[in-house]
Image: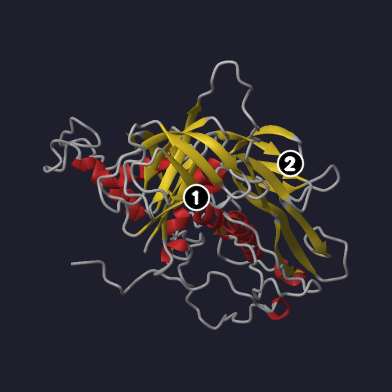
Amino acid sequence: MSVQASPGFNLQPSAEQVALSTNYITNFDFLNQYLPDTYEKEFERYGNRSVSSFLRMVGAEMPSNSDLIKWAEQGRLHTKYVNCTTTVITAQDTATFTINDTLSPGTGGIAVRVGQTIMLSPKTILGTVATVNKAIVTSVNTATGVIEVAFYEANGMTNDNVGNIYEMFIYGSEFKKGTTGMVGSLEADDEIFENSPIILKDKYAVSGSDMAQIGWIEVTTENGASGYYWYMKSEHETRLRFDDYLETAMIEAVPAAVGSGAAAVPNTSNVGNKGSEGVFYTVGNRGNVWAGANPAALSDWDTIVQRLDKQGSIEENVLFLDRSFGFAIDDMLAEQNSYGAGGTSYGLFDNDKDMALNLGFTGFRRGYDFYKSDWKYLNDPTMRGGLTNGKVNGMLVPAGSTTVYDQILGKNAKRPFLHVRYRASETEDRRYKTWMTGSAGGASNSDLDAMEVNFLSERAVCTLGANNFFLFKQA
C-alpha cells in the first residue's frame, strides 16, 4: 500500500487580491431563528507556515552603502598545470613542454621559473605502464608557456609520450653554489567576486470602512497577532510573506543574462532588470554539485569527502536537507550498527519497552564533522518541496567564518561563509523598511480613505568560498 493521491494537500492560494472598495459584508440573514454553534478561534491546520529560517541559522547581516559589493578570495598557494604536452619520445634526457592551461586574467604568463624542480605525470597511457618523472626547469618562455626541462632519471622519460597530456606541479628548486638568486617573482593570485543588491517590495491596503468592521472569527498569525478584525490577519500575513521572500529571494535569485528578456526591460519601467546571484546560483556555478539519487552509502560520502579535501577542508559542516534525504542518512548510519538488521539498537541505545525509540541521527563524522538539519523550504509543497523537476534535496554549508579582503573597507575582515549585505547609511537604513500611508489606522499623510502598509528591503547575499559548499540536486 502507499499514500493515496486523493484526498491530498491543498495548494490553492491562501490570499486573494480583491477590490477593497467594494469588499463589504452583505450576507446578513436574521430570518433564521436558529444560530449556528460557532468556533470563534481560527484553527491553524498548517502549523507555522513560514519557511524562513535558513539564513538566520547560518548567516549574518551587515550594512553596505554601494550598488556593488566586491570581495577577494584567496587563490591556490602552489602551482599545478594539468594540460601540458610534448613531442619528445621515450628515453630522452631533456624535453620541451608546452603548458596549455588557460591562465588567469592579468597573470602575464605561466608561474614557472628556471631552477625549479617539477614532477610530471601522464594523464593518458599510450603504451607502457605510466610512471612519473622528476625534472629541473632549464629554460622558460612565460609568454608562450614553453619550458625546457632536464630529467633526473638516467633513462630520461619513461613513458610513450607523443600525444600524451601531462600534469605538472612544482615541488622545489635546486641551484649551484655561489650563483645568483631566483629570476623573477610571483604575485599573489586572488579572485575577485561581486554581487549586486536587489530591491524587494510589498504592500497591504485596507479601506477605513473595513477597518471598522468587526467579525466573529478570532484570527491569529504566526507572530502572535490576534483579534476580531480581519484586516489584522491580512496585514500580518503580508508581513510574514514578505519576511519569507527576503530569504527565498537570496536563495533563488539569478542575474539577468545578457540578451535575456529581464535584461531588456527598459530602465523607465518600475520592474528590475539586473537580478542578483543567489546561493543556489553561486554554488551551482562555483561550488560542488551532486546530481542524481541522494548519497546514501558510505562510498558516496567518501567521494564527497575527497572533493572537500581538494577544496578548503573545512572541519565542521552543516547539512540542510529535505525529509527524504534526512531519512536516507539515518538509514545509512543505522546500517553501520552491528545490530542494524534487527533495526532497534540504534538511536537511543539500551532501549526498553517503555522508552521512545529514536530512529534518527543529528550528525556523523566521516573525515569531517557533518551535522544535519531539516530545511523546511525544501519540504514545503508550495515552494521547493512541491517541484517534480528541478528539485534540490539539500545543501552542505561550511560552519564558521573566513577571512576576505573587503574592497569597501580596504582591509581583511572576518565574514561568515554566508551572509546578507543590506543598503544602509547614516541617514537611510534599507534593511527592513515599513511605513504607512493614507488617512486610516493612524496614518494621516494622504486624503486616501484607506491604510496602506508598505514594505521594502534592498539586499544581496554574499557566498564566500563557494568551493566549500555542496549542492545536492535530483537528476
Give, as a three-letter code, the residue at label 1: Gly
Left or right of 456 on screen, residue 475? left
Coordinates of residue 429 in the picture (x, y in percent): 78, 47
* Numbered badge on residue 287: 1
Marks 2 and 1: CB-CB under 8 Å? no
Badge 1 marks a residue whose secondary structure is: loop
At a point 41% along the width and 48% down the height, the residue shown is: 88
Q: Determine if residue 117 is in view.
A: yes
Q: CA distance from mark 2 to mark 1?
A: 22 Å
Front residue of 163 and 299: 163
At a point 32% along the width and 54% down the height, the residue shown is: 294
Give, as a three-letter code, the residue at label 2: Gln
User: Which quadrant would the C terminus be assigned to in this image?
Assistant: bottom left
Coordinates of residue 134 in the picture (x, y in percent): 40, 34
* Numbered badge on residue 359: none
Front residue of 368 and 232: 368
Coordinates of residue 322 in the picture (x, y in percent): 39, 54
Q: Is residue 376 above or below residue 319?
A: below
Q: Within 10 angstroms of label 1, few (less than 14), some, or many (20 or more) residues?
A: some
Q: Within 10 angstroms of label 2, few (less than 14), some, or many (20 or more) residues?
A: some
Coordinates of residue 397 in the picture (x, y in percent): 48, 43
User: Which quadrant would the N terminus be assigned to in this image?
Assistant: bottom left
Left or right of 390 on screen, residue 271? right
At a point 63% along the width and 81% down the height, the residue shown is: 26
At a point 81% along the width and 71% down the height, the residue shown is: 449
* Numbered badge on residue 407: 2
Front residue of 127 and 207: 127
Q: Earlier in the sequence, mark 2 or mark 1?
A: 1
Badge 2 marks a residue whose secondary structure is: loop
Left or right of 248 on screen, residue 366? left
| Residue that sits furthest to the bottom in the current view | 31
